[in-house]
Image (spheres, rainbow, N blue to C red):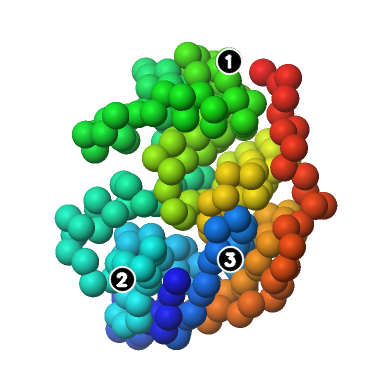
Amino acid sequence: MARGLRRTYRAPDGSEIRALDDVDLDVQRGELTVIAGPSGSGKSTLLQVLAGLDRPDSGSVHIGGQDITRGGDRTLSRMRRRRLGFVFQSFNLIDSLTARENIALPMQLDGRKVDEARMQSLADSLGLGERLDHYPTQLSGGQQQRIAVVRALVSDPEVVFADEPTASLDTQSGEQMIATLLEVAHHHGHAVVAISHDPKVEQAGDKVYRMAAGQLTLVRSNEAARTDFSPAAPWAGQH
């Protein structure tokens, strides 16, 4: 997916900060890939480059055979809308819209019709089937986060990026979020890339990398899907 990524920034004192230093990364469908590391290690920069939100100084990122580092801004924007899904630590839900309307909004802004059956199926699989007509203020933090996951998945993206997905959640909701990411990868077959400093997210990953000083190191890769974090819906029956 990514080869030889380099990205440098200029600090206020004029010194050079190398956020990405010759980074290679491969992700697969059906796997939760976790990129762990402390603040300032370069993992957020890596996510932005992988998702086409920032450009590397050198190197390439391929998604579905397309080198996204060489496209124009309009091409990149269209690619992000149609081939990538995003789950941010802030849910980015609009309080005046129902969960259903929040999920549909990005596709509608892109001029596409929402597959209502797919939306309902995804919501059902994540324990939200009866909550789609509720407003965000009527949902728990964990439920809001899973609405954001449905929104990310409804367009059937090739890769789902999750930025510190448990950072703003309590312990129980965080564990539910981890189970949701595994559900998305193992049962829905998406490639999921999560950056996190949460040890529980790292523990759950099928493939785990660690970033330090702009360099990425593979620390664990499982050939079979993990089962110690069961993606069986722990939120069933919760409101």
Q: Are marks 2 and 3 in contact (CB under 8 Å)?
A: no
Nearest the viewer among 115 and 45 is: 115
Of the residues shown, which amino acid type is indicated by label 1? Answer: Glu
Nearest the viewer among 7 and 207 is: 207
Nearer to us: label 1 or label 3: 1
Nearest the viewer among 63 and 11 is: 63
On the image, numbered disc 3 is attached to which residue? 35
Query: Residue at image x 58%, y 20%?
Result: 129
Location of residue 105 (image quadrant): top left
Instruction: Describe residue 218's horizontal placement relative to residue 61 as left or right.
Output: right
Of the residues shown, which amino acid type is indicated by label 3? Answer: Ile
Of the residues shown, which amino acid type is indicated by label 2? Answer: Asp
Query: Residue at image x 69%, y 76%?
Result: 219
Tally the numbered discs. 3
Which quarter of the rendered picture does the N terminus lie within? bottom left
Q: Earlier in the sequence, mark 2 or mark 3?
A: 3
Q: Earlier in the sequence, mark 1 or mark 3?
A: 3
Rendered location of residue 101, percent (x, y): 38, 22
Location of residue 36 (image quadrant): bottom right
On the image, numbered disc 1 is attached to which residue? 130
Q: CA distance from mark 1 to mark 2?
A: 40 Å
